[in-house]
Structures are given as C-alpha cells and as structure tokens.
Amino acid sequence: MRIILFLLWLLLPVAAFAQSAEEDRGFLQGLIEDNLSSAGREVRIEGFRGALSSRATVERLTIADDQGIWLTLNKVVLDWSRSALLSGRLSVSELSADEILLERLPVADESVDVPSPEARDFALPELPVAVEIGRIAADRLVLGETVLGTPVEATLEASGSLAGGSGQAQLLARRTDGPQGELRLTTSFSNADRQLALDLALIEADDGIAATLMDLPGRPPLELTVQGQGPLSNYAADIRLVTDGEERLAGRVTLQGDAAQGRQFAAELGGNVVPLFLPQYAYFFGPDVQLDVAGTRATDGRLDLSRLNLSTRALQLQGALVVAADGLPERIALTGRIASADGQPVLLPLSGPETRVGRVDLDVAYDAAQGETWTARLLVAGLDRPDFAAERFSLDGSGRIARTDGGTSTVSGRLAYAAEGLAPADPDLATALGPRIAGAADFSWTEGVDGLRLPTLTLDGSDYGLAADLTLEGLTSGLAVSGEADLRFEDLARFSGLAGRPLSGQGEGTVSGTYAALTGAIDAEASITGTDLALGQAELDNLLKGTSTIEASLIRDTTGTRLRTLRIAAQSLTATASGTLASAGSDIAAQLAFADLSVLGPAYDGRLEADARFTGTPEAGQISIQANGRDLRVGQPQVDGLLAGTSTIDIAGRLDQGALVLERARVNARTLTLTAAGRLATEGSDLTADLNFSDLSPLGAGYGGALSAEATFKGTPENATITADARATNLRVGQSQADALLRGESTLSAQVRLENGAIRVDRAALRNPQLTVTADGSVAGADRNLTLDARLSNLALVVPQFPGPLTVQGTARSQGTSYRLDLRARGPGGIDLRAQGTAAGDFSTVDVGVTGSAQAALANPFIEPRNVEGPIRFDLRVNGQPALSSVSGTVSLAGGRFADQDLGLVIERLQADARLAGGRATLDVQGRPAAGGRLALTGNIGLESPFAADLALEIRRAVLRDPELYETTASGRITVQGPLTGGAQIAGRIDLEETELRIPSTGFGGANGLPDLQHRNEPAAVRTTRARAGLLDDGSGGSGGRDSRPFGLNLLISSPDRIFIRGRGLDAELGGQLLVSGTTANVVPSGAFNLIRGRLDILGKRLTLSEAQLLLEGDFVPYIRVVASTENDGITTSVVIQGRADEPDVSFTSTPELPEEEVISRLLFGRGLDTISPLQAAQLASAVATLAGRGGEGVIGRLRQGFGLDDLDVATDADGGTSVRAGKYISENVYTQVEVDQQGQSQINLNLDVTPSVKLRGSVGTEGDTSIGIFIERDY
C-alpha cells in the first residue's frame, strides 16, 4: 500500500513540470525507483508508460532485498481521474495487476525498534486529499511455499477510501489452486467518534490452509469469524471458530477507557477444543476449556494483569501480575497444576514423542508491598517419554528484588534443582548420568550494569560434578564470560557405553579466564589431571597408569593467538609446545621426550625424542622436524630388528605461495636409508625419493640380501609421470619358494603416466634369472588395454615334482563399457589353463570361462605335510558378481593319490568330481587306501563361509594302519552336517574287523631333542623342513589359528571281538563298543573294549590276564589297562600295564606291599631278590626291559644299585634278540664287562686305560673266542 500511495502522490505534480514524454518517462521512473528504494530494499520498474495520461501502466515491478527479489508485479494498471485532483480528491477507478508473485517474505530488519512505554490512541492518518480507490485487483496472486508453508494461488478484489480522518475498506481473496477457500474483510473507522467496525471471515473446505497450518486432525472444513462494532472506549468483538459445522471455540474480547485514563482489557473464550487436537489429547483438554484474562494498561506503561484463569480437565492455572513502568515486577501471584482426577499419568499436548507426567505443580510469589523476597517452585513428578523418564524433577528458587532510593534496582536469588530416578531409554546414557543429578545457581543483577553474576553454578552426579564461578557481561552489547570452572570424574567407567570402548580411572580439570563471544578474544588457562586412566587401548592404557596431566595457557587478541604453554606428561612421556600464531607471522615449537617406551607394554622398549618448529606464514614459512630413537621396539619382529641401535628422522622444508618445498627428508635405521626432496604444489609437483637397504637381515631370521630403489613424481594428480626403478641382490624373505625365485640379481622398472584421468603404463618389468614379468597398457576414459607376459624358468623351484618353464600370457581390452579378457598359462606336467570372457568396466559383474588342466601337486606347498598327486581337469564359468556364488561347472581328478603322513594314510586310485552351482559344490570322491579297502565321499558343501556341508563318508573294509601302533580293517558310514567353520555335527558308525594294537618297544636310552636349542640365521629350506616335521613352536599353544566353534560328535565304534593287544610279551583279545560324544574340543567317550582272553609271557613264565580294557580318554590315541596276577607263598604279585597305547607305564604291585624289585623277583623266580643268582638277575633285568619298553632309572636303576654295578643295560639286536650287559670298574683304569644273551651265551670284556688316549681291550666268549686290540681315541 505504501508503494501504491507513493505512486499516486508522485503523479500529482507531474503535469506541471513535464517537458516531453520521453524525458518524463526517464525522469519519473528514476524518481520512483530512487524514492521507493532504501537500505535493504531495491525497487525496479520496467515498461512504465502513460505517466501523463489517466491510464498508466507498468510492465514489471520488482522489490528485492539482500537475498534477491521477493515480490514481483506484472502488467500493473493505474486508471485514475486527473480532474478529481482539482477538487481535492484522488480518485482511482482501478489499480490492478495481472499477476502478483510473493516468493517469500522479506528479510526482517534486525534493528531494534523499542516501543514507547506510554500507551497511545489508535488513529487514521490525516491526508491533504481524499483518497478513493474503486477497485484493487489481481487476476493471479501467487504465494511461495515459505510464506504459508504451502504454495497458494488466488484471486484478489479490494476497494477502499480515506478522507477527513475516516476510512473504510473491503477485501475478498479466493483460492484457485486447491481446496476452496476465501478470506473476506469489511472494516471502517472514524477518528471523530472513535467508532470501529470489523467483520472478518475465513472460510475453507477440507485440507485448507488454516487447518494445515494449525495441524488440525483430518484437516476439516473451517470457519473463523471476528465481528465487532462500537467506540474504542467501550468496544467488544466476538470471536467464533467452527470446524465440521460444529462450534469449537467462542468468546468476546473487550476494550474500555482510553490512552489518557488508562485502558482496561478483558478476554473470555471457551469451548470444546478436543476435535482440534489428536484424540489422545482428549483427556488433557476435556469437553470445556476456558480462558479468562483481565487487566489494565496505565498511561505510564504500567501493566496490571488482575486476572488470569486458564482451565482444562487436567490443567488449572491462576494468577495475577503487576509490572511497573521500569519493567520490574511489583507483584507476582501464579499457581498452576497439571494432574488427573484419578491419579493416572497425563499426556501433554506437545510436539515430538509422547510426553506424560504424573503431576506438575507451579508456584511463584512476590509482592513488593510485603517485602523484597520472591519465591518460586516447580515440581514435575512421573515424567515419562519413550526416550527418557524421571521419577521427580524439582526447581526451587528464592531471592530479592530490591529498589533503592537512588532508583537503582537489584535482582538476586538462588535456583536449586534436582532430578531423581533418571531412566533414559539408552542404557549407556543411563549409566553415564546415574539415577540422580542435582545442583544450584546463585545469580545477581544490578540495574545499569550490563551483566549478570553467577558466583555459584554447580552440577553433581553420583561420582562426577561441575562447579563454576562466572560473570556474564555485555548482555546487550556483546556477551563476554569470565570466571573459573572445576570438573571432576571419580570413575570414568560410567561413560564406557557412550564412548563405545571400556573406560576407567579418575579425572579432574580446571579452566579459568575470559571469553568474548563477539570478538572471539580468549585469555584462559586449563589443566586436566588423570589417575589410572584406561581408554580401551592396551598401549595407551599402560602409558596412562598413575598420574597423567595436560596443562595449557593461551591468549587470543587482535595481534594473534599466543600459546604460552602446552604440556602433556604421562609416566616417561613429556610433550610440550609454545609459540605464537598470527597472520603477520607465526613461530611455534613442540618437543617430545619419551624416555622409556617399555611403559607401553612388554613388546615395546627404547627411547624416542623429537622436535618440530614452524615459523613464518602459510604463504612463506619454514618447517623442521627431527626425531631420534634408540633401541626402539614396537612389537613387530621385522621392525624391531631394523630399529635396533640408533634411528633418526630429519625433515626440513618451507612453504612457498601455497607449495611445500621439501628441502630435506631423511630416515636412517641400521641398514636402511630413505631420502626424499622436491616440491609439492597444487599446480604441479616434482618429487624424488631414494631407498637404500644394504642388508635385509636386521628384519629377522630368513631375511637377507640388498635392495635399492629410486622413484620420481612429476606433475599433478591429473597429469603426472611416475617412475620407479629398484635393484635387489639375493633377496630372502624366509619363505623357501619365494627365496628360490628371488635368487641372484633382480630388477624392477616401471613408468606410469596420468593424463587427464587416463592411466598409461609405459613400462613395467620384473626380471631376475628365474622370473620375468612384463606389463604395459593404458587407461583413457572408456579405452582400457593391458598386456601381461610372465615366465618362470623352472616350476620346480616352487613345486619340485614339475621341472620346466611356466608361462602366463594374456590381455585385457576395453569393449564399450566392458573388458574382453584372454589369459593363458602353460607349464610342465600338462599344465594348460585358459580364461576367456568379459567383465564390466568396474568389475562388478563378469562372464568368464576357465578351462584346462593342471596338476594337483601344485597345491602341495599349501597343504604340507599332506601330499596330493594326479591330473586335474576343469571347465568352470563365473557369471555374475565376482563371487563364489557365481561359479558353475566341473572339476575332476582322475588316477590321483593322496597321502597324510601324520595319519599314516595313503589313498590311491583317487577319482574326484565336483560340480559347482548356486554357491555349492556337489562332491563324488572315490579312492582305495594303499593297504586295501575302499572309501567314498559324497554330498555337497557351501563355497562361502560358513561352508555349510552335508557330507557322507562310506568306509568299505578299509585297512588302516600306523606302523608303530595299530592295524585294523574298518567299515561304516560317517556324516558331517553343518557349518565347517564350526558347529557341524559328525555322526555315524564304524565296525572294526580284526584289529591289532601293537605296544611299541623303544629300547633303553634313545635320542632325544636338545632342549632350548635356538636356530640362528636359519636358511629358509631348513626352517621349511622343521615345519614339515612339526618341530616349530609358533607360540599358538596348539590352537591352530583363530578360535572356532568345535564340531559335535556322535560316533559309535563297534567290534564284538578280535581286538588284539600284542607286544612286550602281551597277547590279549578284547571286544565291545565305544560311543564317542561331546565335541572335538572336549571328547566324551563312553563304553570300552574289555578282556575276552589273554596272557603275559615273561622268561618262559606265562601269566593269565585278570583284567584288560581299551578305551578313549580325551583324544583318539587308545588308553589301555592290563593286569596279570599270580600267588606264591601267600603273596599275590601283579603286573600292571596302563596308559596311552604308544607309551604305557609298567608297574609291579603285591599284597602285602613289597619293594617293586622284590615283587619282580618273586613273580619270576618265586624267591626274594637276595637269593637269586647273577644269571637270574640278568634274566630279571631282561624281563623288566621287555615290559617297560624303554630305559630310565626306575626298576633297572634300582637293580644296578642293588647289585653294586656301575652299568646294567639291556640291548636288542637287529633280529630282535635280547642281551643283558653288566659292567664294573675293578680299579681306576680297569673296567670289566659281562654280556649274556637270551640263548645263555656269555662274553667277558676287559678294558685297560693305558693313557687318556690309548686303551687295551680284550674279550673271551663261552665258545672260546678271544680277541685283543689297541685303541687310540682323541676328543675334539
């Protein structure tokens, strides 16, 4: 309207001063634009015509603010009467626009327009002319979405007049783009009699604008009317809201009095508003909601709200308020309650998650006439939300509002709060908060002081708290905070859930200083102290044991930020920093001293020191970093070996107009030197790096050789040339096959170019006497090509069974949006593989066929100590995503052989077929154990984890043997069902035919491994041999790798008879059955094979077995117990053989109890040890050796000591014959020895030590054979 009136007034003097139409047009358009525009508002007019006629038009008028145009009027028409101006009237018959576009509301003026505290009467402006506007119209009024929350299109019709202090207006707007709706307004007012007439109606159909903005349930049809007429000194207006044809809210608003005497106001509204809210809020409002407000606004601005009553079914609010002209209250009396009549929780009509309360009480009281004290209390009981609940929340306040004689007022007080029974839905947050928090805040405000004092501000939880003393200044001119705050945590474990890691320890911190929010100025000091902190990271937790501290002091002002000090200390670590950061130039330095890294854990050790400094500006600055380590260890053997002794890092560089110039970068560590230099910049970099590794042996056992390399990078990430050249001599990495491939001189040369997203491989070649690999190609947009050519001179370097060269050749070429792949490998032993097909540009899908043949022995290096042989043919296809689920086809092995030395199993004539489809492999495997029988494995297995299997193994009279322990013939069926990564079930039945369990005889003595033997600089081949022999201790503790779930067991092993235990004079037959259950990690056997018949032969003496049992205890090596007894002279003697079948123990017992050697003598000869002859003693020793099967002190030692001999031994010849040898020193240099074999033949030997190196030896036998000799021996 302001713009319209200005246009009208502007046209009034135009006729008198205009000279020509063209000049008038330019002058007037500029005048209008300049006068209507102002700061934050720009008015532009296009196509202004008819300025001197009674019909003026504007093609386009726009109004813009700092964010752009917000109002546009298209094709504006002004039809007015110039002659009416002569009679003092501005008569406009039409002011219209084809289109008004209000895209958004203008940006609000941020300047504060403080209203006058004094009231004033409403009045229409007095204009020098009467204004009559017959029609204001817009065929299309468009409101943007941000204006009313939804786009709106409507038509607009209006008229009005203003003359002699009286005015009237009519307006009608109808919506045209959606649900029907119209807004009608008729109003008039006269300054003379103060009569105001108002008739406002908003009527909308379903889904109307008002129902949408009010978010009424169902968005019903709505009608809102406001009607009133009368003088402002005694005015009343009726308000009525109707939805769905039902009255929801109605009442009257009244005004009485005038601005000179003070104006009284009152409002009484009520009704059933439940349909205006969601059904769940029905109880809160109830069928009758009433609002009753009355008060007076005095001429000096004093407000007296004498009556305030708001009531619903659940809410009661009553009160009165008096606010003096100075803005401070003179009286407050406010009470309120939210509660249900039956005590049930009340659902509050709030947005967001449903919020319920058991009860809310509010009480605020202050009366200046009674004193200066004010009190306030808020209580919320039973707060319940889906994400949070609390049993009780209370806020209690008290203080003073004081007015002094000088007019200076103060407000002070204390607010104490407490929340109890806190129960957040998030259990981690609940643990962190604890069940209760409480605190208080003391505050004071003084009139005329632009600030607020908070001398006490506290928060206290179960074992954490905050205490602060703050001053807030510049509340209206720019907030500044100063003071001190202390924070404490007695147990950080409560925050573990929120942090997502285990925390523990104690901490406390202090911060003090000032902060200006408007300027960002800071002057602060802070310190944090932790005790036994743990953050869930082992090394860091070890470092933070005991006391750790962080201290900082900084100031930020107009000259920059000065870090006065920053210090971090934890055990043997100290880090410090200080300096200045400023736009004109910075100078900041940092130091690190780590005196002993062993505090990080047992894998760490050594000392580390470092210094860093930056000076200058980001455009021209200097950077330097130096670090020194001594005997560092970080828990990685290869790295630890390299860091032994002194290692250093030295870096120096400068910033040059956005580029980093690396002047010096050098790393030294024993035999390694790495250097780099150059320029790194967005517009182009030029970097070089050199590596010299003179000896790889510091990396650990198995490593060796020398390596050197140079690399360059020139250009940008989009366009660059990268080169790399490396040379190596006799590299060793501790893996025998790799070491064999890397023998001799190896070179690597590569050059790659980046060209606007394209990658071109100019050269890439690896060469040494054994291996040659070359590759080249390019990637440019959709054009991608790669050629590969590799040759291994002798495959026997990796798989000894296949001497001869192996070649791999192939190409990958782009084909539209995909690749065409063609790869072929050929080698000895019939190896011929070919892969052909296509792949998507991003390799998300492939269609590749793989056909050919190979040798199963190629897998032997990966399955040691097992061994497989035989030709493999395959015809596979990968169609879909590059995953095993996309593989289909067949793999077959014919005439193969499999051996497992640990199991003593050899399978020959091995036939295997696997059909792959749908992510599973269907197996059909047939084979014959070398010793006889047949094995057949059928079923299917998943190709991806957890490798779900359904397999069945048929055993048909398979001969299974361990040459040192057993031989049996087995038949049966075993199934494996479930995931092979753990949790599968192994079940079935095995029937054993004739089975022989041989108790091995290891003889006396024997070779044992050397204890604590360490292998230094062990060749890879030797280490591989020891690994195959199972002689490496990898520290795994037998876990065999990562933990997995064990397999369940349900196996029945049955053999009614013909299980024979033989060896060491024992011959026993057993029978029965065993049930093996539990899991592979905890085998639970039940049942046993028990004695059928048996005997024990010792020196021609046969003892009948009284007990024999074979069972399993925890693993699959049988456990035996055999007992043979006899009685003589009232003494019962027994021989007991029990333990693992591969190394049983032998014991001799008697009743009554006798020494073990005495028991043996009575068992064999029927008499005591002291009455037997030397020959019988030798026989006794032989018998014991036969039973024991191995040497040791034991019974033999006690027999030797009993006979007073220096040596007593039993030997076994190549034919199995046993002999007993007894020896004794006759003098210092004369030793005699008697040997008797099991046929009774004897031999006497005599040794005479002439000197330590010269010996005479002679012997004579039972048959008269004699010999004599001179022996010269030398130890070296």
Image (cartoon, rainbow, N blue to C red):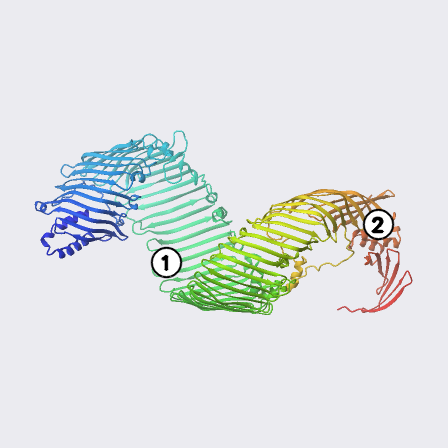
Seen in the picture, residue 727 relative to 414 is either above or below; the reply is: below
Kindly identify which numbered label has been placed on residue 1098: 2
Q: Nearer the viewer, residue 858 or 1140?
A: 858
Kindly identify which numbered label has been placed on residue 874: none
Left or right: 995 in relation to 38: right
Q: Position of residue 396 (x, y in %)?
A: 38, 39
Q: Which residue is labeled 1 in the image? A: 556
Q: Nearer the viewer, residue 657 or 906?
A: 906
Left or right: 295 in relation to 906: left
Density class for disc 2 (Cα within 10 Å; few <14, some 14-19, many ≥20) is: some
Q: Is residue 701 visible?
A: no
Circle count: 2
Q: Residue furthest right?
A: 1264
Kind of residue sitting beneath label 1: Arg
Q: Position of residue 270 (x, y in %)?
A: 29, 31
Kind of residue sitting beneath label 2: Ile
1 or 2: tag closer to the N-terminus = 1
